Image: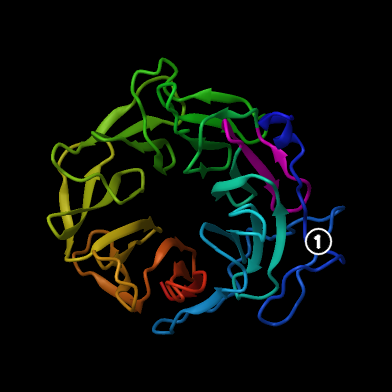
């Protein structure tokens, strides 16, 4: 029987840009086709999103329910990439669609489960579960063939972050102390940010220009991207709940938590120090995202009641006035903010249909 490694090497990688045999139908009845040669993504990642998201407009559907299980997604330029479930395996496909919602295509089909997806604006990266480890794969946004970025790593990779030069992640391992991996996107050279394994790092939860942030049961940690040490604690949890969302602008770390039926948003210097509460809510605050001016998050019902209980909120850095951008959202998740729009996943019907990916004002 072939090993998981050999099965991984034989994974089917299919790209949908040409004629072939369709096996699913989209809402506009355009057949999804498979092509196996000379296909690519062909994205202008420097282009602004083509979608229009004027203030006050209701969310518009980008990925509809006919494409099963659009759970994880990223945006590069005018294209959104998302994981989807095929008829024979969960989350084993990656699709692309214009941010306007037009022209969805299946670009990757493989045998392994895709746990995480990321982009640096030049390439797409995703983690594939091999059963006894994970491999990080990549595909240029200008087209080409997917490839393994580096040899497999132990255990499962649930979160993945990328910048212009490297990909960062911390595999979940039950047999060894977890560490933070860095893979160079051009050479595939793999290194550990904590080479001596001093601390059992949890998931990577954010990156900024200079640092990688991880969270474990006790603290939020900052490690230099250059590596060389165990890093420093930005925040110790003590009796607090761990953060539900984290973002950094290189000066401050912003994070949310939910304790004693109260959701709070906080700011703390990246080097540690005074922890300032900048927003209060009776809801769960998650998916913390920064752009150059504002802090964004999703405000959720603490009971996960499905109908019309979520909202997108923002707070200008340095301000105390929280603005509700869009409300009455059904269980919003997975917030991505671009120069013109906010993208997130919402429940369509909790019992019968997959979630939708929508775009709305920011």
The verdict on residue 147 being magenta is: yes
Q: Is residue 352 left or right of residue 14?
A: left
Image coloring type: rainbow
Magenta stretch, residue numbers: 130-149
What residue sits 60% from the left and 75% below the top? 100
Task: Determine whether the residue tagged by mark 1 lies in a helix, strand or loop.
Answer: loop
Left or right placement of residue 100 versus residue 147 in this view = left
**Residue 91 location, quadrant:** bottom right
How far across and how far down the image is residue 346, in percent? 44, 71
The number of numbered badges drawn on the structure is: 1
User: Which of the pair 39/120 is nearer the observer?
Assistant: 39
Q: Which of 142 and 26 lies nearest the eye of the viewer?
A: 26
Q: Residue furthest top?
A: 196
310 vs 145, left or right, is: left
Q: Is residue 96 magenta?
A: no
User: For residue 221, which quarter of the picture?
Assistant: top left
Toward the bottom, the furthest residue is 57
**Image point 32% across, 58% down: which residue?**
286
Residue at image position (41%, 36%) is 212
Percent x, y for residue 187? 67, 29
Q: Residue at x 54, y 79 (%)?
A: 52
Q: Quadrant of the C terminus?
A: bottom left
The N terminus: image quadrant: top right
Q: Which residue is denoted by mark 1 in the rendering? A: 34
* Percent of width and height locating residue 69: 55, 63
């Amino acid at each position: 029987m072939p090993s998981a490694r050999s099965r991984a090497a034989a994974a089917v990688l299919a790209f949908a840009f040409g004629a072939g045999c369709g096996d699913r139908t989209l809402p506009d009845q355009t057949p999804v086709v498979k092509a196996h040669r000379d296909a690519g993504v062909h994205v202008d990642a420097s282009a602004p999103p083509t979608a229009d998201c004027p203030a006050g407009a209701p969310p518009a559907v980008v990925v509809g329910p006919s494409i099963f299980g659009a759970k994880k997604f990223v945006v590069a330029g005018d294209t959104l990439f998302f994981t989807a479930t095929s008829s024979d395996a969960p989350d084993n496909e990656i699709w692309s669609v214009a941010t306007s919602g037009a022209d969805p295509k299946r670009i990757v089909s493989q045998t392994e489960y895709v746990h995480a997806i990321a982009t640096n604006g030049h390439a797409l990266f995703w983690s594939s579960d091999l059963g006894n480890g994970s491999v990080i794969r990549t595909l240029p946004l200008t087209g080409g063939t997917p490839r393994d970025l580096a040899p497999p790593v132990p255990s499962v990779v649930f979160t993945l972050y990328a910048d212009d030069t490297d990909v960062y992640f911390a595999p979940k391992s039950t047999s060894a102390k977890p560490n933070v991996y860095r893979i160079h996107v051009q050479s595939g050279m793999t290194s550990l940010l904590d080479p001596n394994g001093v601390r059992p790092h949890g998931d990577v939860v954010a990156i900024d220009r200079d640092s990688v942030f991880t969270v474990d049961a006790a603290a939020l940690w900052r490690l230099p991207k250059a590596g060389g040490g165990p890093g420093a604690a930005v925040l110790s949890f003590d009796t607090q709940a761990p953060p539900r969302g984290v973002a950094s602008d290189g000066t401050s770390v912003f994070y949310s938590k939910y304790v004693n039926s109260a959701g709070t948003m906080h700011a703390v210097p990246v080097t540690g120090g005074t922890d300032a509460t900048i927003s209060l809510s009776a809801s769960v605050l998650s998916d913390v995202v920064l752009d150059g001016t504002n802090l964004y998050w999703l405000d959720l019902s603490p009971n996960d009641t499905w109908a019309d209980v979520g909202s997108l909120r923002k707070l200008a850095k340095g301000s105390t006035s929280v603005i509700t951008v869009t409300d009455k959202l059904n269980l919003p998740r997975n917030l991505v903010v671009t120069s013109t729009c906010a993208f997130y996943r919402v429940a369509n019907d909790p019992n019968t249909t997959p979630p939708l990916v929508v775009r709305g004002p920011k």
